[in-house]
Amino acid sequence: MFAVALSTLMLEILLTRITSVIAWYHLAFFVISLAMLGMTAGAVIVFLLPKVFADEHVPRRLSQSALAFALTTPVAAGLAMAIPLLPIDGLMDFFALLAYGGAMAVPFALGGVTLTLALTRAGLPASTAYGVDLVGAALGCALVIPLLNHFDAASAALLAAAVGALAALCFALAEPRASDGEGSGRRRSLVGSGALAAGLVALGLANASAEAPPLRPAWVKGRAEDPEAYAFIGWNTYSRVTVQHTLEAPPVSWAGSMLMPKELWAPTPQRAIEIDGAAATMMFEHGDELERHAHIDWDITSFAHMVRPEGPAAVIGVGGGRDVIVAARAGHSPVVGVELNDLIVRLHTEEMEDYSRLTRIPGVELVSAEARSHMEGEPRRFSVITMSLIDTWASTGAGSYSLSENGLYTAEAWEVFMSRLEDDGIFTVSRWYHPKSPGETVRMIALAMEVLHRRGVEDPREHMFVLRQFSVATVLMSPTPFTDADIDAMQEAAGLGRGFTMLATPRKAPSGGPLAELWAVKDQAELWTWTAAQDLDFTPPTDDRPFFFNMLEPSTWLSDPEAVDELDVSFLGNLQATQTLVYATLVSILLTAMTLIGPLLARRHELRDVQRLDLLASVTYFGLIGLGFMFVEIGLLSRLNVFIGHPTVALAVLLGGIISFTGIGSLISGRAPIEDWLDRAQGLGGRAGRLFPLLTFALVLLAVLASGPLTHAFVGKALGLRVVVGVATVGVPALGMGLGFPLGLRLVQRRRQRDGGPELGPWLWGINGAAGVCASGLALGSSMVWGVPATLGLGALCYLLLLPLTWRLGR
């Protein structure tokens, strides 16, 4: 059980990573939701085929299903990397995506059969079985990190399958010895499982060591991929970084000035860095030869250095190093580059150090950390802090469904960055601009205004300067008002020197449209009133609702794409991402309904023996704990990801922590003599047997109320201390949530022993899993519309609603 749970959780994370490379993040969310519903399908299969899974066949079926899981996992991984996934542009594309997700669901369905049998049919104590299942899943979550640090995702998937084969070997060893015929079958299972495990390990290691791995992504973002085009390919738990071979071409810029001297357009050696095949930046050769890179000075993202050319500088998001180079060229020292992705830092410090030479520039420091957490503890003050187009399409492409950059675009984050500036320092941010729909630019300015209001500024316009060049807008904001000398210098440098458009300055309001309306806002209350009343959501993002990139109102989520293009620029992906979330959630709800109705119809004659209220209470109970667990998990992860400060650590500490503590809670529940309590009928013991959800509700509510103050109190502290606080924050409610499934199953089994009827355990396990998959989309939607606190509150409410159900089942 431990090995199967470990393997399936590893496979889930690895297929998510693979699909995120091949397709856009919102499609990955959809496909993985379908795949995880395979676990539910496995539980329903066990319930619908009682003869196939009769008690005497369970030992053999355990080894067979685990072996089938191990065999089909490489096939699913191969399919994931061989078939291109394209955006949904019609009904056929939707059904193709549905079929793709269904194919990937096959190993999960087989793993679901194995876990369902082990949990509900193997005669193990429910608390022990469920606890072992969750602890195994938690370890699988943690093991993905070292695996992806040393292997590519495809090879890691083969190694995960090998763990599934070892599980089949364990189940074969556990089969009872019987007649010669059955004994030979047991021997075949032992030999086959062992040989498959060894073979998968050998294949995984061979694939990882191959110069051009045969098992690798063949399509990335709809285009065929040639591995020979890359000088470097690296994987970690949240990205795949590729670097192309050196190209001699005119220097690439985000939004360069048309007035740049012609000689600076001369071809220069550069290498394209891509994250997940989409988010690209350029690495220029020999960063320490600063005179070779004068072209970077003419990009709009570099403008702040013309105004504040001296003093310490910080760069949020190093990428190829262009912002670090321009800061050093301007005369800043030190220049602190903070980069979330350790693979990119490795490029500059190890893999391509001689090409980049970024760290050879005097005063340059590269830090591998999440920028917000690092700046919380940074003792120095800076004259310029730069954040230029920092995203990996993880947030833009998926609205709410990932990852790190959302935490950089909230009022609380910008307050941190502003607090690390010198009194006349400049925080400069660049985002995309489109004349027809300047959504990101408007929201960026609204966010800047909110931060300045929070700092006690009466008129934020005196602290801001907004420029545009082509499709990029840059805002410069300072803790103190820009002086007349600053404004004169910026106007001359921007207009005459660079030819940039001045959208807004302390002396000039925007010419029209939403930017002009926003610039005319007088105070903080009016800011929120105006931003909330627009067709797009321009309200300043906060930590409680940290979705900068998702600006579509719920009323437009299912609108015609052509109509929404009037509001939202299509290349930003917000509509596709949000509509895919809605479609994924609707499909999950539909399949969950089938999980509920199908078994009712198929075994209606046997279910007539179960009292209707008992059946309704059982189904609702296990659906609610599936919903509640995911609402609490997603809410806490949203709140604590930024607090921990690094996606890899957050994956191990938060996701692994909440799963493992739920498992520990399940193991503890085995010591609760709930049957003895209920047999007393009256008194404290009888009530305790039916009121145990109150404990879970109280622990979840405690985490909901304490998580905000705790993160604010310990933000900026040492990572070790933040990890302890994070684990405690998720561990306390998880202990309570671990009680739900095993104690509920014991209540159902107790009534069956008394009243008779079919074994409902597999079906209820399937309902629990299906509700959890539905809840992932519903929780994200709840956070997008109402905020993270509402999501946590709904999770707590789910556990409170268990009370009447346990009262009924415990009668």
Image: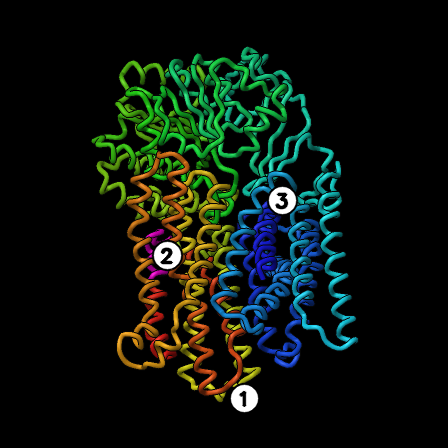
| Image coords of residue 622 (percent x, y) | 44, 70
Q: Are marks 3 and 1 in contact (CB under 8 Å)?
A: no
In front of the other: 809 or 235: 809
Residue annotated with mark 3: 221
Amino acid identity at mark 3: Lys
Q: Residue at x 29, y 35 (%)?
A: 451
Quarter the C terminus occupies? bottom left
Amino acid identity at mark 1: His
Relative placement, left or right, of 402 versus 527 is: right
Q: Can the viewer see residue 143?
A: yes
Residue annotated with mark 2: 733
| Image coords of residue 766 (percent x, y) | 53, 69
| Image coords of residue 585 (percent x, y) | 49, 61
Amino acid identity at mark 2: Pro
Query: Of helix, strand and loop, which one carries label 1?
Result: helix
Query: Of helix, strand and loop, which one carries label 2?
Result: helix
* Numbered range of the magenta stretch: 783-796
Q: Residue at x 53, y 85 (%)?
A: 604
Query: Of helix, strand and loop, which one carries label 3?
Result: loop
Q: Which quadrant of the structure image shows residue 51?
A: bottom right
Residue annotated with mark 1: 605
Q: Main secondary structure of the magenta part?
A: helix
Please tell me whether residue 247 belongs to the stretch shown in magenta: no
